[in-house]
Image (spheres, helix red, strand yellow):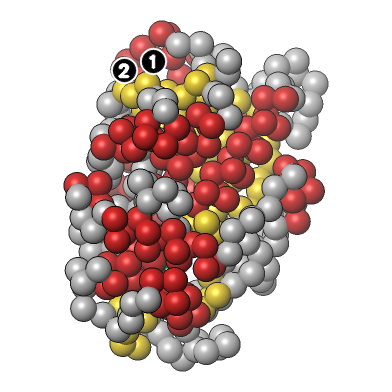
Amino acid sequence: MKTILVTGGMGFIGSHVCVSLLEQGLHVIIVDNLCNSNTEVLNRIDQITGKKPLFYPVNLLDEDALSAVFKRHNIDAVIHFAALKAVGESSCIPLSYYYNNITCSLVLFNVMEKYKVFNLVFSSSATVYGEHNPIPYVENYPLSATNPYGRTKVMIEEILQDAARADPRWNISLLRYFNPIGAHPSGLMGEDPNGIPNNLMPFITQVAVGKRDALNVFGGDYPTKDGTGVRDYIHVVDLALGHIKALEKLIASPNNNCVRSNSISAYNLGAGKGYSVLEVVKAFEKASGKKINYVISPRREGDLAEFFADVSKASEELGWKVERSLDDMCEDAWNWQSKNPEGYLS
Ligand code: UFG
């Protein structure tokens, strides 16, 4: 049985990926410092899969503690999620973002090298396409970013490109997520942000349960179908299954004999089409039977009018594409929030 180490495995995307890994019969070890997550996630994973992953409350900055995990277990691959991820906050405390996201990643990659673990799936983001590329975004576009959070993703991708160029034992998949929403269909796991949600769907679900009065729609005058921002929403379970496909490809072709040259590859994980904010609101109202009050507000700084993915590379090389619709995303997000109005503390 292969053993997969998941950093940040208690978070929204990480927890769904752990469920998929366990359902594939893989052995899962989570390393997470719980800065934005809750240990209740472990019980929920257990309830869904009948299995509890091993959990180490380790901060990746603690190289000794991380090394001890690698020493104790025979790890076949790592999926690296652990990072700070709030775009707005990253502009207020950029040094914390650079220190945390970059240093944690460097510690992890160095420990992996020391223990000769070279299979890596890295959690990247569509934010690496910056603001000047035409849509749909294609993997070979030049990378840039408009905020410190996004720059950490670009930098880590570049660090990994350099590592793979220098040492062909590295076998790396860079997964660029578009807009993951939804929740596990059981209603046991979902998105549980601290404080006021930054992202659209958790804000909508909190309006629906009465925790917030109204959604601020950031911008009603974009050059889009209805004036509101357009994004490529992807169900978190489809996203999780994309990780399984990427991992299968890495493990099926271990790159330990120094002969392959394309040992690092980037993939867009999105649906390949865009929905506007108002379309998401409408779909959510249909799924939940709740009216979502909203007000059109000024644009949010740094937001782009519209972007979505070209998903042909993931389809051709990983044999992956999304199977769940916007309606599924809304139904599952509502199922989660209505059953857990206070998130994991409900
Ligand atoms: N929006 C609102 N009101 C809100 C929140 C969002 O109108 O309260 C709008 C935004 O303006 C945007 C859309 O809803 O048009 C989606 O916004 P999100 O904040 O949910 O997502 P973003 O596209 O801004 O950001 C996401 C990820 C980032 C990532 C970025 C680019 O959250 O981590 O995609 O890939 F960097």
Kind of residue sitting beneath label 1 = Val
Q: Which residue is mark 2?
A: 65
Q: Is residue 4 above or below residue 34?
A: above
The residue located at (44%, 58%) in the rendering is: 332
Q: CA distance from mark 2 to mark 1?
A: 7 Å
Q: Do callouts 2 and 1 mark residues in contact (Cβ within 8 Å)?
A: yes
Q: Is 187 left or right of 253, judged from the image as shown? A: left
Q: Is 141 left or right of 21, judged from the image as shown? A: right
Q: Which residue is mark 1?
A: 69
For label 2, being within 8 Å of ligand 1 is answered: no
Circle 2: is it few (<14), some (14-19), or many (20+) Cα within 10 Å? Answer: some
The residue located at (37%, 34%) in the rendering is: 47
Give how far across and how far down residue 58 sits, in percent.
30, 25
Kind of residue sitting beneath label 2 = Ala
160 or 320: nearer the viewer: 320
Question: For the image shown, how many numbered marks are present on the structure?
Answer: 2
For label 1, being within 8 Å of ligand 1 is answered: no
Q: Is residue 99 visible?
A: yes
The residue located at (61%, 37%) in the rendering is: 244
289 or 9: nearer the viewer: 289
Give how far across and how far down residue 65 sits, in percent.
31, 17
The residue located at (37%, 59%) in the rendering is: 335
